Image (cartoon, rainbow, N blue to C red):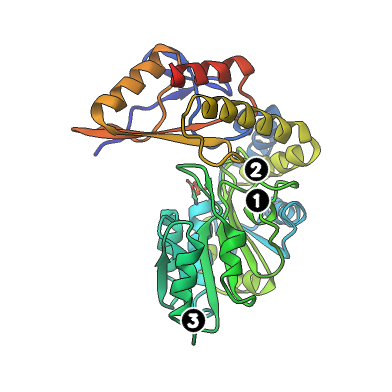
């Protein structure tokens, strides 16, 4: 296995690949904020003043005022009791797994949960039971086999990033006691789903103290970093000798400032979310009409599985022939096929979206 060929971003909606400028539907920067002048300015100014990195963990000398400010903004934006910023979304899950150690009698995890959530499950210190992907009936069956269990933890991605499938967290929650804690890895849902863009739980009408969210800043927020959103016990556990918080350098101030700028943009410019939803609805209606799979209608991602190498290469050539970068999650190898993933952004033009639909349905 080797890395795929490197690609060079070229503005918000294009990349350079093998000497060509191609339209880009890859990645998870759903508002293309990674290229937004406000984020770039915030990052550059902080880097010029504070340096590139903090050079220390938050528990020693690496706690920068921008971290505190960002946590205050995250609490306001997501409506959680507390927010704790860490180095990235993967670390957010690991830190959370460590903080949850000894607090639960059993954890139930979606079989297709992100690898960071599966890794984090190893730290919780209780039996971890896998249930069938997004299947509330299967969850209920497995829970009923452990009736004696009191402190229950559910672990699921809010949105499964490869396919764009939104987890049925409302249905899953109904199959658990009201005292159960719901840990939602909302790397993809945060900033995209829900009226206030708070994520999957908001979209499914869930909230309050039973929900814990782990998020990344590297998708809808267009920056880099991660955070854990939850109630006070969680914050206390994260600050009480947590290995990730104690043993890793804190988020560079420039990234904290850039993330503050992106939260502000999402808060004050509802047109961004409106455009993303409009673009998603446009593409998915056309795909549906063409008989193509659309994934979850609410989420700006869909995927096409090409099981054989021939079909995979044919799609690759069609996309390249139409000036579109062929973004894969699984690239064709040997005789195997590929898994193509497409992410619609708020910044794609109608012409680019029409072009994608034409390329896929041609
Ligand atoms: C569901 C999910 N959780 C966690 C992560 C990790 O986030 P980060 O890239 O910030 O480490 C990702 C990123 O790809 C993800 O898709």
For this orientation, the residue located farthest to the right is: 268
Please state the horizontal and vertical placement of residue 241, each as a whole percent of the image: 54, 73
User: Which of the two residues, 140 or 116, is positioned nearer the viewer here?
Assistant: 140
Within-10-Å neighbours for mark 2: few <14, some 14–19, many 20+: many
Residue positioned 63% across, 77% down in the render: 179
For the residue labelled by badge 3, is the local secondary structure a helix, a strand or a loop?
loop
Which residue matches tag 2? 192
Which residue matches tag 1? 199
Please state the horizontal and vertical placement of residue 297, each as a whole percent of the image: 59, 39
Answer with mark 1 or mark 2, whichever residue precedes in sequence: 2
Q: Quadrant of residue 361?
A: top left
Instruction: Find the distance from the CA under tag 3 to the CA under tag 2.
Output: 33 Å
- Indicate yes or no: mark 1 CB to ligand 1 under 8 Å: no
Residue positioned 37% across, 27% down in the render: 6
Which residue matches tag 3? 105
Image marks 1 and 2: residues in contact by CB distance under 8 Å: yes
**Image quadrant for the N terminus?**
top left
Answer with mark 3 or mark 1, whichever residue precedes in sequence: 3
Q: Quadrant of residue 13?
A: top right
- Indicate yes or no: mark 2 CB to ligand 1 under 8 Å: no
Please state the horizontal and vertical placement of residue 128, each as a whole percent of the image: 41, 72
For the residue labelled by badge 2, is the local secondary structure a helix, a strand or a loop?
loop
* Residue 242 in the figure: left or right of residue 114: right
Q: In this picture, is 75 found above or below 317?
A: below
Within-10-Å neighbours for mark 3: few <14, some 14–19, many 20+: some
Q: In this picture, is 80 found above or below 220?
A: below
Please state the horizontal and vertical placement of residue 295, each as a whole percent of the image: 51, 39
Within-10-Å neighbours for mark 1: few <14, some 14–19, many 20+: many
């Amino acid at each position: 296995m080797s890395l795929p060929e490197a690609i060079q971003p070229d503005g918000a909606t294009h990349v350079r690949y093998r000497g060509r400028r191609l339209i880009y539907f890859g990645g998870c920067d759903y508002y293309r904020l990674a290229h937004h002048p406000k984020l770039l300015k915030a990052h550059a100014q902080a880097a010029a003043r504070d340096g590139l990195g903090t050079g220390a963990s938050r528990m020693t000398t690496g706690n920068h005022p921008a971290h505190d400010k960002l946590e205050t903004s995250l609490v306001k934006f997501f409506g959680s009791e507390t927010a704790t910023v860490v180095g990235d979304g993967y670390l957010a899950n690991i830190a959370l797994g460590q903080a949850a150690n000894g607090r639960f009698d059993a954890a139930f995890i979606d079989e297709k949960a992100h690898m960071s959530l599966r890794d984090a499950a190893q730290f919780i210190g209780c039996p971890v039971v896998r249930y069938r992907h997004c299947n509330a009936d299967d969850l209920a069956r497995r829970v009923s086999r452990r009736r004696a269990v009191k402190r229950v933890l559910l672990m699921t991605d809010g949105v499964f990033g490869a396919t764009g499938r939104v987890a049925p967290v409302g249905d899953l929650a109904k199959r658990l006691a009201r005292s159960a804690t719901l840990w939602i890895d909302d790397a993809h849902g945060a900033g995209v789903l829900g009226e206030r863009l708070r994520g999957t739980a908001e979209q499914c009408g869930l909230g309050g103290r039973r929900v814990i969210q782990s998020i990344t800043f590297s998708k809808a927020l267009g920056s880099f970093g991660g955070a854990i959103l939850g109630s006070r016990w969680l914050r206390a556990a994260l600050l009480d000798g947590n290995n990730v918080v104690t043993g890793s350098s804190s988020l560079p101030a420039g990234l904290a400032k850039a993330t503050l700028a992106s939260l502000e943009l999402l808060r004050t410019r509802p047109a961004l979310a409106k455009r993303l939803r409009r673009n998603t609805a446009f593409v998915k209606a056309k795909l549906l009409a063409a008989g193509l799979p659309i994934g979850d209608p609410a989420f700006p991602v869909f995927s096409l599985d090409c099981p054989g190498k021939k079909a995979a290469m044919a799609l690759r050539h069609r996309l390249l022939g139409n000036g579109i970068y062929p973004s894969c999650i699984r690239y064709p190898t040997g005789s195997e096929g590929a898994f193509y993933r497409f992410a619609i952004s708020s910044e794609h033009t109608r012409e680019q979206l029409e072009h994608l639909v034409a390329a896929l349905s041609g």
